[in-house]
Amino acid sequence: MDLTYQIVRSARRKKLTITVERDRMIVVHAPVGTTEEVIRQVVESKRQWLFDKLHHSQKYQDRPHPPGKEVVNVESALYLGREYSIQIEETTSGGVEFLRRFLIPAAQQVKRRNVLKEWYVMRAKEIILPRVVRCARELGVAFGDARIVDNRYRWGSCTVQDHVNFNWRLIKAPMFVIDYVIVHELAHLMESNHSPRFWNIVRAKAPSTEKAKTWLKEHGQILEEEV
């Protein structure tokens, strides 16, 4: 079987690593100057591991009220790790409101997914970004900028300019998962690869690291849904 992979080179990277994203794309992260032949040899040496990863069927929990073609009463949406019902009901603001349930005015129902996404993005900026600032201060690291982005297959990323990006869909996850992803990306400002030192930093600051990784593995597909 031929292995198709994407190469991402970085001047900050000292070691070549291979990851398999949730869309089953193989990504090779390599230091600048690494030749195509060296990369090919490393990929070939990991062929069996990659084959196992590509054909592993991840298990995701079913939602009690899976989203349908229209948002109607008794459907639900995730927020900070919990399911809340979605109800079509007029609101004082005329937009989406959250009162231990999601309220969507009838006039917004046609563009329901867009207005819910906008609500999620606003909450992500209000909740996640201040936690990034606080965590960076506690870790003693400086970042260029922190952004909420629309990236379906990555929960977070750290750029060569030391910017940190976070997927808006994270706002659907429990706080311990959000904190883990924040620490994970900020730790890359101290250690660019996933070395033992990197994981020591992450686990020291985020004690629920393993629990968070398991949660993302089991629920990642649910977070990727627009609603």
Image (cartoon, rainbow, N blue to C red):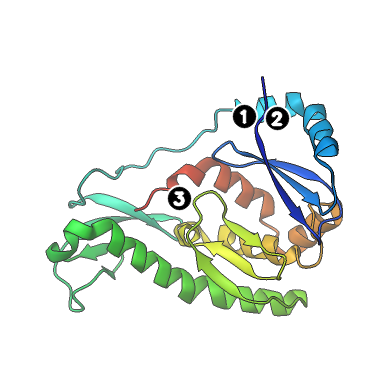
Which residue lies under the disc numbered 2?
Answer: 50
Q: CA distance from mark 3 to mark 1?
A: 20 Å
Q: Secondary structure at mark 2?
A: helix
Q: Quadrant of residue 122?
A: bottom left
Helix, strand, or loop for circle 1? helix
Crowding at dot 2, Cα within 10 Å, few <14 / some 14-19 / many 20+, comes out as: some
Mark linked to residue 89: none
Q: Position of residue 53 (x, y in %)?
A: 65, 30
Q: Nearer the viewer, residue 96 or 163?
A: 163
Tell me residue 99's x, y (percent): 28, 69
Q: In which quarter of the view is residue 137 placed?
A: bottom right
Which residue extends farthest top?
1
Look at the numbered disc 3 and give the secondary structure of its residue: helix
Q: Are marks 1 and 2 in contact (CB under 8 Å)?
A: yes
In the rendered view of the protein, which quadrant contains the N terminus?
top right
Residue positioned 48% across, 37% down in the render: 60
- The residue lying toward the viewer, choosing from 25 and 168, is 25
Question: What kind of residue is marked 2?
Answer: Leu
Which residue has dot 3 on it? Answer: 223
Above or below, 198 relative to 34: below
Residue type pointed to by label 3: Leu
Vertical placement of residue 215 versus 131, above or below = above
